[in-house]
Amino acid sequence: MNDLTINLEIHSSIPLYEQIYKYIKNEIQNGGLPFGERLPSTRKLAKYLQVSRTTVDMAYEQLVSEGYIEALPYKGYFVCELDGLYRLMPVQNQVKRFREEPKEIFTYDFSPNGIDLDSFPQNAWRRLSKTILQEENRKLFQLGDPQGEYELRLMLAQYLRQARGVETSPEQLVIGAGNDFLLLLLCSMFGTGQKIAMESPTYKKAYELFGNLSNELRVIEMDESGMRIDRLSDTDAQIAYVMPSHQFPLGTVMPVKRRMQLLEWAAGAADRYIIEDDYDSEFRYKGRPIPALQGYDRNDRVIYIGTFSRSIAPAIRVSYMVLPRRMLSLYQSRGRSISCTVSRVDQMLIAAFLNEGYYERHLNKMRAVYKGRHDVLLEALRPLRSICEIRGEHAGVHILLTFTNGMHEEEAVRLAAKQEVKVYGLSGYFVGAAGLRREDTVILGYANLSEAEIRSAVARLKTAWMPLNE
Amino acid sequence: MNDLTINLEIHSSIPLYEQIYKYIKNEIQNGGLPFGERLPSTRKLAKYLQVSRTTVDMAYEQLVSEGYIEALPYKGYFVCELDGLYRLMPVQNQVKRFREEPKEIFTYDFSPNGIDLDSFPQNAWRRLSKTILQEENRKLFQLGDPQGEYELRLMLAQYLRQARGVETSPEQLVIGAGNDFLLLLLCSMFGTGQKIAMESPTYKKAYELFGNLSNELRVIEMDESGMRIDRLSDTDAQIAYVMPSHQFPLGTVMPVKRRMQLLEWAAGAADRYIIEDDYDSEFRYKGRPIPALQGYDRNDRVIYIGTFSRSIAPAIRVSYMVLPRRMLSLYQSRGRSISCTVSRVDQMLIAAFLNEGYYERHLNKMRAVYKGRHDVLLEALRPLRSICEIRGEHAGVHILLTFTNGMHEEEAVRLAAKQEVKVYGLSGYFVGAAGLRREDTVILGYANLSEAEIRSAVARLKTAWMPLNE
C-alpha cells in the first residue's frame, strides 16, 4: 500500500481537501495507484498527514463522486477502473480572451450597425444576474417552454402595448435568439416556396435567408412613403416584409395612410401576411413614436418582430415575435417542436430588467444620448448642405446623405477613407435586379461616436468632399 | 415655482437621491411640473430638504440623463417636452416566476429526456458567471463572431479531440443555441430539396424539421448494428443523418465495421455527407467510449453535432457543429450571415467551465451517478427478464424493454400508468411509412430518478406487468 506522501501546502489558497483530492487523482491517472489498489483508511491518512479526518473524508468523497475510487463496506476504499473516465487537459497556451481584431485603419467609423455601449447598465445587469442565479431554482436549468418563459412574454406583451401600441397576449409571443433565428423559424413554419415581397434597399440578410430557403422574392419599388402598394398589388406576393418604423437603410418612416393601404392589401386575400420588422423603432427625436403597424391591424395579418439587440446590447441575443392569432395552430404544428434558443437565465434577466424599471430608464437615457449625437451631427453637417441633402433624420441612429453636386457614392467613400473616416455606400443594400440603384448616397451611423468625435469626423468629411472651401 | 415638498424617508433602503429623482419624475409625468417649468436650483432644494447638495445633484443628473429635464447654462434646470419619452408601468399582478406545471398524475416518470439536475454545479456556475460579468469588458456585449467566440471554439476543439476523438480546428466549429437551430442553419446552407436518409425510429424533431424545409426524406431500415448501408446505397440519398454513439431511441452503438461502411458510402459520390448527431455519447458504462465517426473520416464528409444540453443542463442552450473543411466556403457564403444565437457571456462561461476543469469533474460525477442508477435499474429488472429483453444498456441514460410474452406496447404503457408509473412506447418514434413499427417495446429513461425511486418504480412495474407472480 502506497503511503501517499503528499506535500500539503498549509498556506495555499487551495483548500487542503482539494490538495489531497488532486494528488490522489493524479496518482491514479498516472498509474501510481493502479486499478484495485486499496487506499489508506481516512483515519490513518489523516493521522499521517496531520490533518482532520473530515478533510480526508471530503477528499475521498470527491474522488468517489467522480468515479476514481469506490467504497466497499467493511473493506475500505479501492481504485476504480479508469476506462471511460474523462481526463481533459486544459488548453496549454495562454489564450487571449478575445481574438486580435483586424487593425483599424479608420479614425472614425460611421457604422450603421454600431450602438453605444458606454451607457450599458453593467451594474444593474450584474446585480440582476446574480439575484437570478442565486435563487436556488433547478427549474432555471431544465428545458423551458419552446415559446419562451411565460413571465417574460407577459412583461413583453405589456411593454409592447405601452411603448409600441402592439396588441398581443403572451400566447402570441415567441422568444428567439435574434431576428435571423426568428426568420428561420417562420420559414420553417410557412414552408418553402413562399412569394415574399421586399423593399430595396433592405435588410440584406433577410433577403438572403429567404432566398436560401427557396422562397421566391419579389422586389417592390419604394417612394418617399415606403413600399409602393400599387406595385405590391401587381405581384403574386403573399407575404410582405417591411420596416415601417424606420426603414433600413433608407430611414423612411411609413406614414399612417400607407400603413392602412398595406393592411388593406393583406386583408385582400386569404393567406396574405405582413412581416413587420420594427427596426430601430425605439429612438425617435420629434414627437411621439408612431405605433407599430400591428396595432392598426384589424384582420390578424401582421407578424411583428422586435429585438433587444439594438436597445440593450447586440450580444444579448434576445428577439421576440408576435404571431397573429390565426397562425397559432400553425405554430403548434410546425414551430413548437423547435426548442427555445434563449437560455432561461437570460430570459428571466430580461424579464426582471423590464419589470423593475431598468429598461424604461435605459431607453430614456439612450434616447437622450442619441438625440444629443443626432443634433450635433445635423448641426455639424450644416456647411455641407450645399453639396448634399439629408434624409432619414427623424428616427433611428443613422442618416443618409444624398449628394446634389454630382458626386458619386464610390468617390465619396474613397475621399472619406483618405481622411480616415469610414462612411458606407447605400448601393450595398440594394437587392434584386439592378436599375433601382442609386449611387449618390452614403450612410452615416452615429450611435458609436461621441459628440466630440462626430464634430471632428464631420470636419474631416468637409475637407474630403469640399476641398475648395478649405 | 413648485416648492417640491418631498417626504423623504431617511431610514428607507432607497437612497435619498433616488427618492428625489422618483418624486420629480412622477411630478413631471403627472403634469405637476409642466413642460418649460423651471426647477429650484440644487443649492436651494438641498437647503429646503435638508440634504447635501451632492444628493440633489445626483437626482438632477439622473433626470437629465433620462431626458426629463435639461440644464440651460446660467439659467437653471427646466422640464423637457415629454413626447417620445418612455413611461412603462410594471406588470400589476404579482406574477409567479414559473407557470403552474400541469398536475403530475405519475409518481414515477421514466422520461427518456430527463437529466439529473441535483448534480448541476450551481456554485461553480454562479462563481464563473460573476467573474465573467465583473471583467469590465464592453466587448462582451458587442456582437460577436457568427461562428461563436474563438476562445470557446479552441477549448471545444481540444475537448472534442480528447474526449471524442474528433479532429477539428476552431475554424471548423460553429456554436449555436441548440441542435434544432444548427440543423436549421445546415438546411439553409445546403438549400432545400436535399435527399436525406434517416433511421427509423429516430429523433423525430429532426425528421419534421428537414421535412418542413422541403427536403426529401428516405427512411432506411436498421439492424442490430444501426443503419443498413446496403439499403442506404439503394436510395438516391446524399445526406445520411445518424447517431452512431447511442442511437435515439434504440440505444444501438454502431460498431466500427458499420462505421467504416458508412464512411465508404459517403466517399462514393461527390456531394455526399454524413450528419453525425453524437447523442448521449458522454456516458458509457462498459470500456472506453468509441470515438466519434468523425475521427475515422479520411474524406472530409462528416458534419459532427454535439450539445451541452444533456451533459450540463437542458436550459443552457449551447450546441456545436464541426463542419468538414470542404464545407467552409459554403458556410462563408450561406451560413455566416446568420448571427450567433448564443450570448457572448454564456459562451465565455462554457469556455471557462471547460478550461478550468469543471467540465471534466462534472462529466465524471454524472457518469458515476448515472452508472449507479443504471446498475440499480438492471438489477431491479432481473425478475422481469422472464417477460422481456433489455436492449441499449451499454450507454446513455435510457434502456429499452422488449416484451417476449406477447404483451403489446400500449398495454404495457396502460398497465404501468395504472400503477402511476410513466413509461414510453417506442412506436411514437417511428417515422416514414408504417411496416417498420415494433409495438412490443417500451423506453425507460432513468436520469431523472434516484436509485431508491428506481427500485420502487420497478416494483410497481412488476405488479403491473406480472400480477400473477405477486
Image: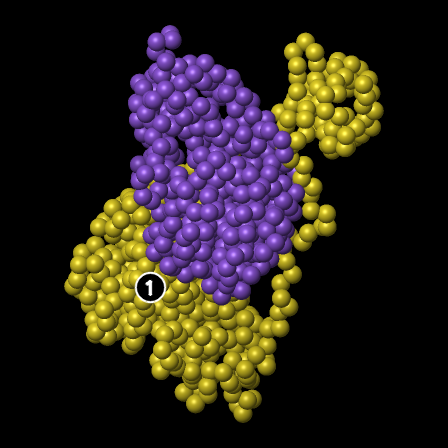
Chain colours: A purple, B yellow
Residue B210 or A81: which is nearer the viewer?
Answer: B210
Is A145 placed left or right of B212 in the picture? right
Residue A184 or B347: which is nearer the viewer?
Answer: A184
- Seen as rendered, the residue at the extreme top is A470
Which quarter of the rendered picture does the C terminus of chain B lie within? bottom right
Is B66 placed left or right of B307 in the picture? right
Q: Residue B228's quadrant in the figure?
A: bottom left
- Residue A419: where, in percent of width, then height? 34, 17
Q: Residue at x 36, y 16 (%)?
A: A465
Q: Secondary structure at mark 1?
A: loop
Q: Amino acid at mark 1?
A: Asn
Q: Residue at x 45, y 34 (%)?
A: A250
- Residue A461: where, in percent of width, then height? 39, 17
Identify residue for label 1: B215
Is B198 placed left or right of B8 in the picture? left
Label 1 resides on the chain identified as B
